[in-house]
Amino acid sequence: MTYTVAVDYRKIITVEPGKRGGKPCIRGMRITVGDVLGWLASGMTREQIRDDFPEITDEDITAALAFAADFTNGGWRMSA
């Protein structure tokens, strides 16, 4: 199955060895992809996430989902 993602997560998801143990983060912040996925899995809506964390955009949430989809389909590709 082929799908088109509306956002290029490689421009949003960052990995820095000294930040959050090298986990993939949103735009260099200390909020990880795992944090975002966990909030969604717990039933939080995108709006609730944005209300609780105003620095997070809808595009960031989509990037976290796209990253997770790519990761589970054979790994992430951080290079352009």
Image (tube, grey):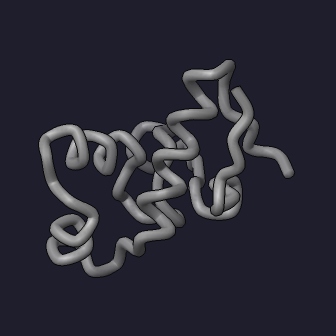
Q: How many numbered discs sit on the rendered protein?
A: 0
Q: Nearer the viewer, residue 32 or 62?
A: 62
Residue 80 position within the rendered picture, expressed as x and y whole percent measured from the top left: 86, 51
Q: Relative to 72, say whether 25 is above or below.
A: below
Residue pictured at 69% horizontal, 41% vertical: 3
The quarter holding residue 73 reads top right
Residue 12 position within the rendered picture, expressed as x and y whole percent measured from the top left: 60, 62
The quarter holding residue 61 reads bottom left
Residue 1 position within the rendered picture, expressed as x and y whole percent measured from the top left: 70, 26
Q: Relative to 48, say whether 75 is above or below.
A: above
In the shown orientation, is residue 57 left or right of residue 45?
A: right
Residue pictured at 67% horizontal, 33% vertical: 76
In the shown orientation, is residue 19 left or right of residue 10?
A: left
Is residue 32 visible to us here? yes
Is residue 18 visible to us here? no
Q: Which residue lies furthest to the right in this view?
A: 80
In the shown orientation, is residue 65 left or right of residue 15?
A: left
